[in-house]
Image (spheres, rainbow, N blue to C red):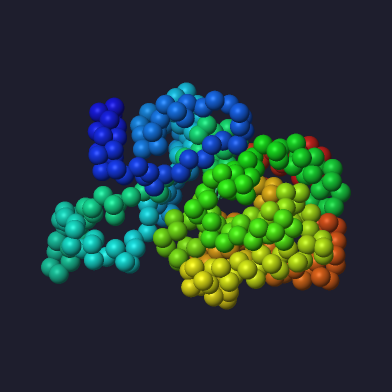
């Protein structure tokens, strides 16, 4: 094991290839905590990964979510096979070796051994990870929650205020240009109407068929849909219009090919808008969680307090702390 790691490190240095297709997400909790970061080169951080449990795996989606430890600290690793790129077909055919599996009449199957750069696995690392991160990726049953205006103020809001500061550091890093600077697709720097548009971590940025971008607002006091009033229509229209133009410019996808929406509940309480390709079903785009931005704008137009006053419905998973709060309040 160590030998392979050492060799890989050596090869990587020799070829001056520094960053593999791996992403580091520092756990948002304990921002000041010294991690073992300095002891690991990015290309060998997974060498000492000790698997604890497979959280979820899907042959169909070709991914696996693993809970383990690195250097004694909890970690989550997500491995996902990349889709085959049309523009790599030439190289794939000319540069690969075929291993025959079976042949019968005019039919034959093979395992194709592709050149290493066409054989990469998208890898996402959360380390050090909290229990919450581990739970997030565990396969779990969902329950539909009904949240009245009163439930929001007595259950959800106190929960958000307690937890919020902890897990949006990565968002501030993006807004302050401390991380992911080179990934920004578009920015409107206006403190009130402005936002940063960039690829979501889930998207490999290669395949436009699975396009997934997020617009993160510069304003820091907007937690979710529940905070929006008609006052924010200019902000929402600005994101809608400029986001669509930026995506047309960069990816040649027109507005009628895009699904533009907000989540409620969101996975992080700093207002953001999702832009995904219409002919692609990413996680979280179903009716119980996604609210089309176009509809949000109209609802606010018709009723300035729509999202502050109406009952909202959303799914929560078994181990979600917020679900526990609803149960405790006798609301489930
Ligand atoms: C997250 C929701 C959050 C685990 C995981 C992801 N897009 C992000 C850090 C940087 C990012 C995202 C939380 C975290 Cl795997 C816990 O997502 C991110 N950068 N969605 C981008 N561009």
Measuring from the top left, give residue 77's x and y in whole percent: 45, 39
Front residue of 138 and 82: 82
Whether residue 13 is situated above or below residue 201 in the rendered picture: above
Pick the front one: 209 or 145 = 209
Side of 190 where 307 appears, left or right: right
Q: Identify the image quadrant of residue 3.
A: top left
Q: Is residue 289 visible?
A: no
Q: Is residue 128 left or right of residue 96?
A: right
Q: Looking at this view, is 252 or 149 the one in front?
A: 252
Asked if residue 240 shows in the view, the reply is yes
Residue in the image at 65% along x and 71% along y: 241
**Residue drawn at x 42%, y 63% as measured from the top left:** 207
How many numbered discs?
0
x, y percent for residue 229:
82, 61
Q: Quadrant of residue 303?
A: bottom right
Q: Give coordinates of residue 276: x percent, y percent.
A: 55, 64
Quadrant position of the C terminus in the picture: top right
């Amino acid at each position: 094991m160590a030998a392979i790691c050492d060799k890989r490190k050596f090869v990587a240095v020799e070829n001056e290839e520094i960053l593999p297709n791996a992403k580091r997400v520092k756990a948002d909790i304990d921002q000041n905590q010294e991690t073992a970061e300095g002891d690991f080169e990015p290309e060998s951080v997974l060498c000492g990964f000790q698997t604890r449990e497979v959280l979820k795996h899907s042959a169909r989606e070709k991914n696996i979510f693993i809970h383990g430890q690195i250097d004694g600290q909890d970690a989550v690793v997500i491995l996902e096979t990349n889709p085959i790129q049309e523009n790599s077909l030439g190289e794939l055919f000319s540069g690969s070796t075929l291993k025959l599996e079976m042949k019968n009449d005019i039919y034959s199957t093979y395992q194709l051994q592709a050149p290493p750069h066409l054989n990469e696995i998208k890898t996402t690392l959360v380390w050090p990870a909290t229990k919450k991160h581990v739970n997030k990726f565990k396969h779990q049953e969902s329950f539909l929650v009904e949240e009245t205006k009163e439930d929001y103020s007595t259950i959800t809001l106190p929960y958000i205020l307690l937890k919020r500061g902890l897990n949006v550091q990565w968002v501030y890093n993006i807004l302050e240009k401390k991380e992911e600077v080179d990934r920004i697709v578009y920015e409107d720097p206006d403190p009130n109407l402005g936002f940063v548009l960039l690829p979501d971590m889930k998207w490999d940025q290669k395949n436009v068929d699975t396009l997934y971008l997020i617009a993160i607002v510069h304003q820091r006091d907007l937690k979710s849909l529940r905070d929006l009033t008609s006052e924010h229509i200019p902000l929402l229209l600005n994101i809608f219009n400029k986001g669509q133009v930026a995506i047309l410019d960069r990816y040649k996808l027109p507005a009628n090919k895009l699904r533009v929406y907000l989540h409620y509940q969101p996975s992080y309480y700093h207002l953001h808008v999702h832009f995904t390709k219409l002919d692609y079903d990413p996680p979280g785009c179903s009716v119980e969680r996604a609210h089309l931005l176009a509809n949000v704008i109209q609802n606010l137009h018709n009723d300035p307090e729509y999202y502050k006053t109406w009952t909202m419905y959303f799914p929560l998973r078994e181990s979600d702390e917020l679900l526990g709060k609803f149960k405790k309040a006798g609301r489930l």
